[in-house]
Amino acid sequence: MKPSQVILIIILGCLLIGIMVYIYRINLSAHDSNPEIKRQMRQENFDLLDQKSWLVSDKTLGRSWLNPENIEVLDGILKIRMPSNTLEGGEIVNREAVTYGSYASRMKLPEAPSSITGFFLYAPPDYFYEIDIEIHNTKEGKLLLTTYANGEVQNEYVGKLGFDPTSDFHTYRFDYAADRVAFYVDNKFILEWQDGFPAEYPMQLMVNSWYPNWLEGTPTTEDQFLLVDWVQY
């Protein structure tokens, strides 16, 4: 084989390797980025509860009264109290209506079996505009991911976190774009759906902890707290 042919083969081989690496990186990054959601993210560190940005709910949800007195910010942490011997909970709602973007929160969950913590986008009426991360407030770490559109559940996932969410802080995130909704826990990709979610409809970001009707409704014997370190949106 002539030297020129050897050089040509080496060059073609390098080009082929480069193309393969490029395709691999594109496929890998598909789960971590999307041009539709690239915008300046804000981070709420809860140095205080900014009432210009956040509403505190006062309503009934499931078995729970979302009592405003259960909401407190202390030492840079949002605390949502689940009072002992009651089925009360709490909720904050971001005032801004948002659409496509990346939404994340670092949270430590209360140990309050038969209740759940939610981090989600929502707009009324029920079952039309909603993208949910919900976690059972137990050591077992049951994870629920759901999207609603057109008056019903469109996508649903039930799985295990693989850790005790009541023992430490963890990061829960979803990316919402025109062509997909993707979910992550501690920056680990869980799954994505490419249809069955609201199409660029303004929704509000919410964080809550409460007792739904579809669980037993057993109160705790001691106060428990959902602790939220920060929220990005």
Image (cartoon, rainbow, N blue to C red):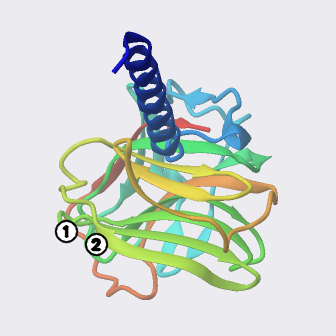
In this picture, residue 7 sits left or right of residue 34: left
* Amino acid at dot 2: Asn
Q: Horizontal and vertical percent for residue 61?
A: 56, 75
Which residue shows up at 47% across the image and 81% down it?
63
Quarter of the picture containing the N terminus is: top left
In x, y percent, where is residue 73? 46, 35
Indicate whether 117 appears above or below 19: below
In the image, which disc is placed on residue 221? 1
Q: Which residue is mark 2?
A: 85
Residue 50 position in % (x across, y down): 64, 32
Split into 4 quadrants, where in the image is the C terminus?
A: top right
Q: Nearer the viewer, residue 175 or 98?
A: 175
Tell me, yes or no, if residue 139 can be seen here: yes
From the top left corner, tell me how far across and down residue 206 is, in percent. Answer: 60, 54
Residue placed farthest to the top in the image? 3
> Which residue occupies 54% across, 28% down?
48
| Tag 1 secondary structure | loop
- Which image quadrant is residue 202 in? bottom right
